Amino acid sequence: MNPMTRNQKTDRTVRRRNRQSFPILPLIGVLVLAVICCAVILKKSRPKWELTVNETSDAKGRTYHSYDWRNLKRDGDRLTYEDEHYTSAQGIDVSSHQDEIDWQAVSEDGIEFVFLRVGYRGYTEGGLFEDQYFRTNLIGARQAGLKIGVYFFSQAVSAEEAVEEAEFMLEILGDSRLDLPVVFDMEEPENGDTGRTEILSREEQTASALAFMERTAEAGYSVMIYDSSARYEDDYDLTALQGIKKWTARYGDTPDFPYAFEIWQYTDNGSVEGIEGGTDMNIMFLPKD
């Protein structure tokens, strides 16, 4: 053993302390920089296809959008929207009425998203049916790179039937991944005939819609409701639907709908490559990062 002098011990102790304390300040700087970088990355990675709207509410709890229709641009049967807070995407909704579809041609024609009909309940007898082209359309639209949502055409006359419709639809969907919501769509017969839902009161129809959407949300899907601009307030209690995404239909220059919504179906006679005949056209309002 070689004993050290007091000075030698002091020098070694100082050097040891210096070696231990030296990395602390740079390490703190690295950690701060990492936190800042993570925050920037998270901000940049916010999903562009997250559907939200800037809303204001009235005393009854109804919410209103902030779109300025002076920013709406039309080019033939295509619409675009751009302002400080929103941009837009062009889409369609289809069912077996369109027969076979060339999805690659649809994508190349500038269509970015689609809502596919999963199934429907009959107007009179009330039977449940899968759309005969749903599975083919789901595969084709996915391969073509479109964002996909689905809708179910309801004729439920009670909340119990609405849950039955949701269960039927979920069984068809299986473990299918969707980019966009599942939509509850209840309409009157197109030919003017009397449908089984005409007996429903506003409160009963609202209850059916909520039952369908609640069951669908339990399965892990986001939900949305569809109706015409002219009929939303007649068909549903909008206070009860507060916070639920909305898709409105009106064939004109503007939606003429003051309440918060995310999608506008603006024509049922659009022209899209890969689809024969007229097609429902939609514009989706997407928040900017």
Image (cartoon, rainbow, N blue to C red):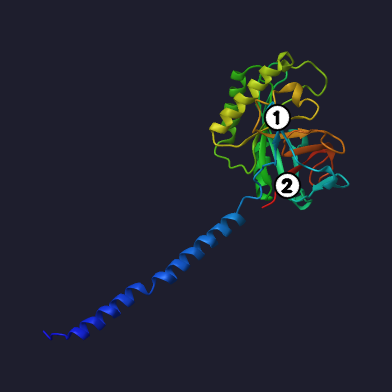
Mark nearest the camera among 1 and 2 is: 1
Nearest the viewer among 147 and 103 is: 147
- Residue 34's mark? none
Using the image, determine if residue 117 lies above or below residue 13: above
- Residue 62's mark? 1
The N terminus appears in which quarter of the rendering? bottom left
Secondary structure beneath label 1: loop
> What is the x, y in percent for residue 60?
69, 26
Q: Which residue is mark 2?
A: 103
Secondary structure beneath label 2: helix
> What is the x, y in percent for residue 176?
58, 40
Using the image, determine if residue 260 lies above or below residue 209: below
* Residue 279 sits in quarter: top right
At a point 67% along the width and 26% down the height, the residue shown is 239
Could you tell me the amino acid type at mark 1? Arg
At a point 64% along the width and 38% down the height, the residue shown is 181
Could you tell me the amino acid type at mark 2? Trp
> What is the x, y in percent for residue 259?
74, 33
> What is the x, y in percent for residue 122?
70, 21
Work out whether residue 124 can be spotted: no
At a point 73% along the width and 44% down the height, the residue shown is 285
Using the image, determine if residue 44 lies above or below residue 73: below
